[in-house]
Image (tube, rainbow, N blue to C red):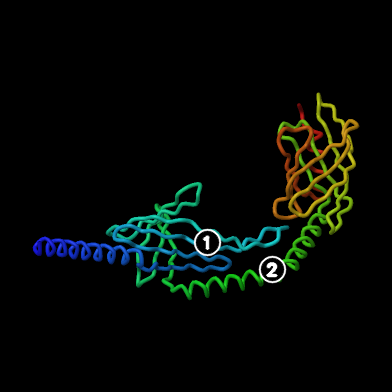
Amino acid sequence: MNKIKKWVISLLASTLIVLSLWWAISETKEEKPAEFFVFHDQGELLWFELTILEDNIEGSLHHQKIIEEPGQVPVLEEKTYPIVGKVHEYGYEIIVNNGEEKTIYNAKKSNGNLFVQLQGNSEGELYKVASEQEIQESINELHEEFDYVMYHAEHKENERIRKFFDELQSAYGFLYTEEDQAFQLFIRIEEALLEGEVSGSLLMITNKDDSFAETTYKWNGITDGIMIRMYTTVNGEETKLEGNFYGDGLSFDSSFWGSKNKVFFHAVTEDEYKKHSEEFKMIER
């Protein structure tokens, strides 16, 4: 009986030792601290949070970026993407999943930092090794940049609008000629207010069987320097022309009832308009 008890006790002790060792190894793996590597450029902050377990990599890519779009309130975009990867003899292969597609990076350590390249690309970025506290300091710096952008956003937008309307009003008009020379369009801006209201005229010259017909349409509309909408009457029905400017007040595209595709208007001086108009009327069809 004593032998059986001793054998049971010995077995239990061995089992406890094995379980303790397994638990200790598991805890060591689970508690292995993540490594942080940060890249901070003007208006943009990225950092890798990587945990390396033997030959496998787990973690996240954090991305924060200040986005400024003309006519829009600035935003601070924050996204986090899951990471998996492998350790190989030349460094790391890191796979970032953005929910729609996977992007693969090659990375290797250099003096503790991480040099990261998009797979197949010879160029890359150096991500500096950082502590959690240093990451938080970088986040705070980006938020300070965003506060500055927000503070000056209204003034910057007002300057953009003012410059746009100066360019818009400096043009004698805006011209478009159909590729097959079937018609020519000429838009005049007769009034343009900083509040966004615009009005003018659209002269359409059609070329059919060497006979030219001219029709003028009055229109009213709105613009914010990015989009433009013009409302006119065609054959007794209200018609909307809608398009977008190309970064300034000197060119824009627009829908047009006589074309399946958008037409492109560019600014012309009075002399340029007369020249193009005369050339159009001299076309042999």
Indicate whether 51 appears above or below 229: below
Q: In which quarter of the image is residue 249?
A: bottom right
Query: Which residue in the protein does label 1 denote?
Result: 63
Identify the residue at the far front of this view: 1
Q: Which of 23 and 196 is in front in this view?
A: 23
Q: Is residue 130 left or right of residue 27?
A: right
Residues 265 and 42: in front is 42
Question: Along the horizontal axis of the image, is 90 left or right of 129?
Answer: left
The image position of residue 154, as x and y in percent, is 75, 66
Residue denoted by label 2: 150
Q: Is disc 1 placed on a helix, strand or loop? A: strand
Task: Give coordinates of residue 101: x percent, y percent.
Answer: 48, 47
Point 80% across, 45% down: residue: 229
Of the 4 image quadrants, the one containing the C terminus is: top right
What's under tag 2, amino acid-wise? Met
| Picture quadrant where residue 64 is located | bottom right
Determine whether label 2 and label 1 are within 8 Å by CB.
no
- Viewer-nearest residue: 175 or 248: 248
What residue is at 78 percent from the left and 57 percent from the top? Answer: 167
Say if residue 200 shows up in the picture: yes
Q: Is mark 2 on a helix, strand or loop?
A: helix
Residue 116 position in % (x across, y down):
41, 61
